Amino acid sequence: MSDAKTPGGKWYVELLERFNTLMERLGIPNDVSGEMKTFILGVAREQYMAGNRSGIRWARQGGASSPSYS
């Protein structure tokens, strides 16, 4: 796949590959995994478009399982 054909390029492809691997490992049905993929990509797109700086800061600080909003 070329970067020109995929939204976001390499990171997008890697995200989908990791997502698909997880769904297969957990035995999640295709209809459920499709809905989850739509949700995850939608949130990622929204955060990217909003320029989520707090998310970037959280990730650079080690990215615990959930961000702290305190």
Image: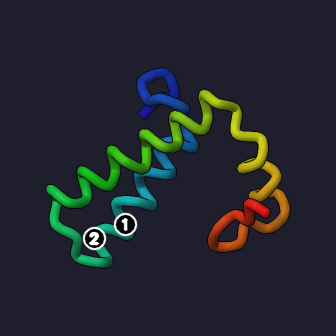
| Residue underneath mark 1 | 21
User: Residue 14's x, y, as percent?
Assistant: 50, 51
Q: Seen from this angle, which residue lies furthest front?
A: 70
Circles 2, 1 touching at the beta carbon (< 8 Å)? yes
Which residue is at the front of the view, 12 or 58?
A: 58
- Secondary structure beneath disc 1? helix
Q: Is residue 6 above or below residue 27?
A: above
Q: Is residue 30 above or below residue 2?
A: below
**Viewed as shown, does residue 22 lie left or right of 35?**
right
Viewer-proximal residue among 26 and 38: 38
SS category of the residue bearing label 2: helix
| Residue lying at 37% horizontally and 66% vertically, measured from the top left | 21
**Residue 56 placed where, x, y %?**
76, 48
Q: Residue 51: x and y, percent?
A: 70, 32
Query: Looking at the picture, which amino acid does disc 2 mark?
Result: Glu
Residue at 82% across / 52% down in the picture?
A: 57
Question: At x 71% / y 72%, what residue is drawn?
Answer: 64
Q: Residue furthest top?
A: 4
Q: Nearer the viewer, residue 15 or 46?
A: 46
| 19 up-or-down from 38: above or below | below
Say whether residue 42 is left or right of residue 11: left
**Horizontal side of residue 22 vs 8, given as left or right:** left
Residue 60: name its quadrant.
bottom right
> Which residue is denoted by mark 2 in the rendering?
24
Count how many numbered circles sit on residues in the image.
2
The residue drawn where x is 79% and y is 63% is 70
The type of residue carrying mark 1 is Thr
Q: Position of residue 40 (x, y in %)?
A: 42, 50
